[in-house]
Image (cartoon, helix red, strand yellow):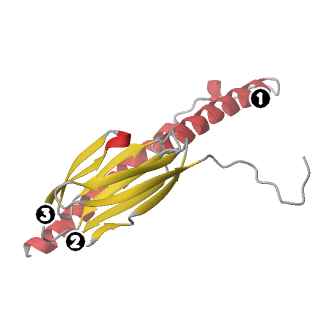
Amino acid sequence: MNSVNFKTVKNFTRGFLFAFFYFAQVKIHAAGLSAAEAPKTLTDKPAQMAAKQSADEEILQAIKKAVQPTEPTKEIVILNTESGFIPDKVRVKKGEAYKVHIVNLNMKEKNVSFLMDSFTQSHNTIFGVRKSFNIEPQVEGIFSYQCPETGIQGQMVVVPEVSSRKTASSEE
């Protein structure tokens, strides 16, 4: 038996044993409930149902909290190439959180800086390696980002928060 087949058999055996003991444990635990733990009267059932619903709700809230992302969901990717930044102009909304990914794809300059002074971001970018950071613009305007070694620049345009727009025919 060669080493590849041996590893396959070994991994399969581990997985099978894990599953077997896990389900055996669940079955033993479920069968271990005594008759004293079972509800005796109909008056016990509503209280137990309320307690179970409360526990279920608590579990549901914990799952929601664990699954809900804490980082910004809006992402921006800026590529540093020999011909400049792609994109060279990025629009973001004031007050919203963004995760910015910078990737250096410049074959001539494989180790360069990325500066975004207005957001106090200064990063070293290595060829092919992604560098990420979070921003949350609070001031409207046009801000630059640059690579001092190559002299290329880009712009980040911070636009106002979305407000309810009215049509020209609507009256106030």
| Place of residue 55 in the rendered image (x, y in percent of width and height, measured from the top left) | 63, 30
Q: Based on the displayed image, in which of its 4 quarters is residue 54 positioned?
A: top right
In terms of secondary structure, where does tag 1 sit?
helix
Label 3, residues with CA under 10 Å away: few <14, some 14-19, many ≥20: few
Q: Which residue is mark 2?
A: 82
Residue, far left: 2
Q: In the drawing, what numbered circle is on residue 45? A: 1
Name the residue nearer the viewer: 161 or 32: 161
Pinpoint residue 131: horizontal percent, then vertical percent: 27, 53
Kindly identify the amino acid type of the residue bearing the numbered disc 1. Lys
Horizontal arrangement in the rendering, residue 121 relative to residue 107 (left or right):
right
Q: Is residue 23 visible?
A: no
The residue that disc 3 covers is: 110
Q: Looking at the picture, which amino acid does disc 3 mark? A: Lys
| Disc 2 element | loop
Q: Is residue 8 left or right of residue 45?
A: left
Distance from the alpha carbon under mark 2 to that under mark 1:
72 Å
- What's the residue at 63%, 24% (across, down)? 36
Position of 27 with respect to 22 (left or right) is right
Earlier in the chain: of badge 2 and badge 1, it is 1
The residue depicted at 43 percent of the width and 62 percent of the height is 89
Mark 2 Cα within 10 Å, few/some/many (few <14, many 20+)? some
Q: Specify the quadrant that holds the N terminus.
A: bottom left
Mark in front: 3 vs 2:
2
